[in-house]
Image (spheres, grey):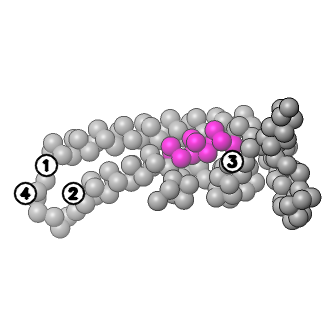
Amino acid sequence: MSLRFKTSTMDGELQERFGAPVAELYQAAARPDAPPALARALELRSFLALTEEQVARVRDRVHADMDPDRDMGELSADKLRFDAQWLEAALDARDGYCAALGALLRTMPPADQQPHPVRMARIRATATLPPSAAPAPPRARAARARRP
């Protein structure tokens, strides 16, 4: 499963800051006029989602190992120590990604002051025009201007 479809603990803050669901934010970030902060935020969000999945895997493994119905002869202190180290590393990474993403979101202007929603409305409006009436993408115009 793609990381863009996995949830993260910061999804609500991203949606609030950018004013759209995470799936739409990934689509908007793929556009050439996407704000750099959006791409950076989604990159951090992807790292966070992956790290949170690692935390959950280790947690579930430890819970399964410590199940009260499990045979005590199967317990391994070495395995639990290794899982504790793995969990500590994953939690440290998670904390770092949360802090970085939180700092990025705090330094951004509110969603109603960002230019991106206006551009999205303009893109949606041009999408309904026939292909001959729609303006060429900026890259295509620049390429045509360079031709001899």
Percent across and percent down for residue 89 are 36, 37
Q: Are marks 1 and 3 in contact (CB under 8 Å)?
A: no
Q: For the residue carrying disc 3, how many other residues have a C-alpha within 10 Å: few (<14), some (14-19), or many (20+)?
A: some
Magenta residues, as a range? 38-48
Q: Are marks 1 and 2 in contact (CB under 8 Å)?
A: yes
Residue 41 among those drawn in magenta: yes
Amino acid under disc 4: Gly
The Cα–Cα distance between marks 4 and 2, rounded to whole angstroms, is 11 Å
Magenta: main secondary structure: helix
Q: For the residue carrying disc 2, how many other residues have a C-alpha within 10 Å: few (<14), some (14-19), or many (20+)?
A: some
The local secondary structure at tag 4 comes to helix
Nearest to the observer: residue 14 or residue 39: 39
Left or right: residue 130 versus residue 19 is right
**Residue located beneath label 2 in the image:** 65
Q: For the residue carrying disc 1, how many other residues have a C-alpha within 10 Å: few (<14), some (14-19), or many (20+)?
A: few
Q: Nearer the viewer, mark 2 or mark 3?
A: 3
Amino acid under disc 1: Ser
Q: Is residue 31 above or below residue 71?
A: above
| Mark before the other along the chain sequence, 1 or 2 | 2
**Residue located beneath label 4 in the image:** 73
Percent across and percent down for residue 103 are 64, 34
**Residue located beneath label 3 in the image:** 29
Residue for point 61% across, 45% down: 42
**Residue located beneath label 1 in the image:** 76
Residue 102 visible in this rendered orientation of the protein? no
Amino acid under disc 3: Ala
Nearest to the observer: residue 66 or residue 104: 104
Residue for point 69% across, 47% down: 29
Left or right: residue 7 versus residue 118 is left
| Mark before the other along the chain sequence, 4 or 3 | 3
